[in-house]
Image (cartoon, rainbow, N blue to C red):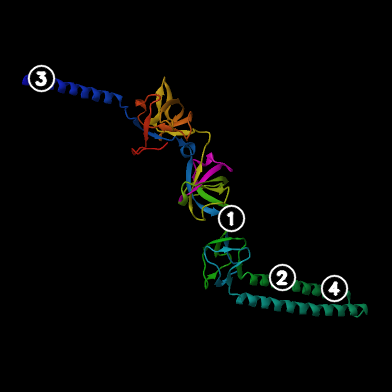
Amino acid sequence: MRNLIQTGLCAVALALGSAVGLAGCTTNAASPAPPRSAIVGHPQAASALNAEIYSGDVHARYESQLGFRVAGKIKARLVDVGAHVQAGQVLAELDPLDLRLQVASAQAAVGSAQAARDMTQSEYNRYRSLLDKHFISQTQVDAQENALKAAQAQVKQAQATLAVAQNQAEYTTLRADHTGVITVITAEAGQVVSAGQNVAMLARDGDLEVEIAVPENRIADYHVDAPATIEAWADAGKHLNGHLREISPEADRVTRTYRVRVTLDSTDAAPKLGQTARVYFVDAAKAQQLIPLSALYEQAGKPAVWLVDAKTHQVHLTPVVVAAYREQGVALDGGIDAQQWIVTAGVHKLRDGEAIAPIDSSNRPVLL
């Protein structure tokens, strides 16, 4: 009896084990395989691929070096660097004492010349009266007339000298010739300056430009009015439109580079004077996109890439046109655009219509 009970229990145990084993097999077979992880990315835009990049400084289009037109000792400096000044505003003054003395001397010379002229005029009138009475000859009258003309010329010369002295006296005041910003001051009160010596630099309001240096082997690629993109180093990622305005006709004798000026099309949100900026010159005729070499796939002897559907995460093979193979990757001339997602690594392990788990190069999930 005991043997029969043991035999029955063993049969039940075997039946239950078989059922559990079958259930386990059935569950494993029904579980879907997790999607394959794949590195994805966007094609690189042509502006970054084909751009020639130069660094330069921001300048005003018109910059004036201001200085006194006469020599003297600076009496006062009335503005500081960074001051915004209006046209005609006084920037600095010279001590006017010496020039005022020159004006006084010139005024005295005019008075002396006028007195001499008046005396000569009266002598000439008297000689004319004597000639009418036949007391003197015509030769004496002519000589007196020439003396009168010389005296009149002396008056004009003295008056011209006075005008010059008066102008120079006014030149003791240095004024801004245009509205703008003072960027440099090179002289201080108490300093003796010569005529024409630079005292301040004025950057006029208006157009802003970036000055760059282009090597001599590249200068032939550029021309006036060529489009450019400008990016301030302090505000990276913000691109401004501009155009090439000026190319120096002669290379610098030391650096062998040509000075090139690129004007910003708009001064709204423009970088500040003196800031560093990058200038990009883009050749629109070159390839449009750049992809990593690892993203390129071959189907029937023709190049293709795996496009990722942003909604379903499924991949689909799409033909592309290769323009060139570069150190940075493969340049494409058509087939995809910069907004589409492509698989950039592991392309030989994918199947058309397969769903993937998109990740970046650091194995972080990517939201498409």
Q: Amino acid at mark 2?
A: Ala
Q: Nearer the viewer, mark 3 or mark 1?
A: 3
Mark 2 or mark 1: whose residue is earlier in sequence: 1
Q: Amino acid at mark 4?
A: Asp
Q: Nearer the viewer, mark 3 or mark 2?
A: 3
Using residue 112 as the reference point, say whether residue 274 is left or right of it: left
Mark 3 or mark 2: whose residue is earlier in sequence: 3
**Which region of the structure is painted magenta?**
213-233
State the SS at label 3.
Answer: helix
Q: CA distance from mark 2 to mark 1?
A: 35 Å
Q: Is residue 257 visible?
A: no
Place of residue 340 in the rendered image (x, y in percent of width and height, measured from the top left): 46, 33
Outermost residue, front side:
1
Q: Tell me the residue that label 2 is attached to.
A: 160
State the SS at label 2.
Answer: helix
Q: Amino acid at mark 3?
A: Thr
Q: Tell me the residue that label 1 is attached to.
A: 62
Q: Quadrant of the C terminus?
A: top left
